[in-house]
Image: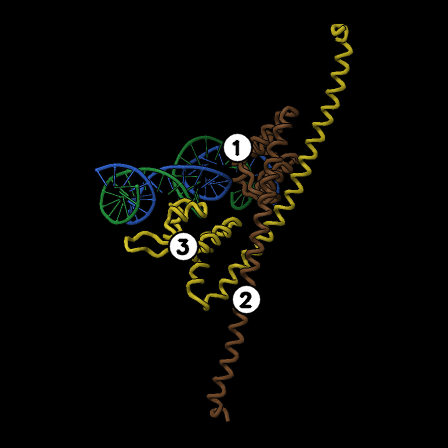
Chain colours: A yellow, B brown, C blue, D green
Amino acid sequence: MGYRIGELSKLIGVSEHTLRYYEKEGLVVPDRDKNNVRNYSEHNKLWAEFILHMKETGMSMEDLKNYTKLWESGEEGTVAMIDILTNHRDKVKKQIEIYKKNLDLLNKKIDFYQSSLEENRSANLYETFVDRKGTDEELK
Amino acid sequence: MGYRIGELSKLIGVSEHTLRYYEKEGLVVPDRDKNNVRNYSEHNKLWAEFILHMKETGMSMEDLKNYTKLWESGEEGTVAMIDILTNHRDKVKKQIEIYKKNLDLLNKKIDFYQSSLEENRSANLYETFVDRKGTDEELK
DNA sequence: CCTTGACTTAAAGTTAACTCTAAGTAGTAA
DNA sequence: TTACTACTTAGAGTTAACTTTAAGTCAAGG
């Protein structure tokens, strides 16, 4: 039961190097088997996945380390855990607003340049038409 | 007319160092006055602000450099500019989805730990009540 | 027996985007 | 005159989060 480092690495999509690095930093510390081989439990896997989700929204290693320590400390860490989570939630909310605002900006820019392309295309068609008229003779 | 580096720095919230760095990278290149002092035009300011907005959503210096060069090349760069913008827009859209997904996750976690706190508080109140009973005599 | 996958430590390298330092010069405003 | 703001080059330093390298050892499966 449990996963070896290579398995988990493939399952969750991070390198073995990174898993060892996370272990060194205290984020995901698996048990070892009799040969000292890392044995990642289901909990280890879930925890690693949670960490990756938090990283997707830019939570720092620092916060993740603190959070993990608090979790390990048991109930007495709960308030501080909630604190980290709510702080991060606020950041994520703000980020979403910023991203949305700039998505609008991008859409406007894209529209603008696409319209300018179309105007040019019309202009070019017109010019082509004019040119054709001028060189029409050759096409007869 | 125009802004000196210190003014613009304050107006748009980036350091003078950074403005000089952006100039070196070809992103925002102001004219100079007779004493070789940078004179940022209104256009320079708008361009800088646009760059900062794009950076807010993680556009790389690389893309911003290319984009700026294309803009400077005039109409012939328009198609490639649209390409950069639409690529980036897709990235931004994906990021928003990821952020939203993880905002949900954060909310669930926070709810979970808050409930666990409340359960504990109830439990503690009960224990307190029991304790009181035991030590009630002293209060008479 | 050989290959595969795992293990170790310690340290160096990578990347992006700044950020700062040094060491000096120069114009402008009070 | 003093203070302020700006200028220059060139290169070193910073930060986060990996990522890689070296140089080896070890155990199981086919």
> Where B123 sits versus A98, above or below?
below
Residue A23 visible? The answer is yes
Residue at image coords 61%, 42%: B53
Q: Is residue A140 left or right of residue B31?
A: right
Label 2 chain ID: B
Q: Decide: few, some or many residues near mark 2? Use Cα within 10 Å; few <14, some 14-19, many ≥20.
A: some
Where is residue A4 shown, x and y percent of the image? 37, 50
Work out whether residue B54 or residue B93 is closer to the camera in this orientation and state it: B93
Q: Decide: few, some or many residues near mark 3? Use Cα within 10 Å; few <14, some 14-19, many ≥20.
A: many
Label 1 chain ID: B
Q: Secondary structure at mark 1?
A: loop
Q: Look at mark 2 in the image and give the residue it sits on.
A: B114
- Determine which of the numbered discs, if any, sits on residue A28 in the image: 3
> Where A99 sits versus B104, above or below?
above
Where is residue B61 shown, x and y percent of the image? 53, 36
- Determine which of the numbered discs, if any, sits on residue B25 in the image: 1
Determine if marks 1 and 3 fall on one subunit.
no
Residue at image coords 51%, 76%: B123
Q: Tag 2 or tag 1, which sits nearer the N-term?
A: 1
Q: Secondary structure at mark 2?
A: helix
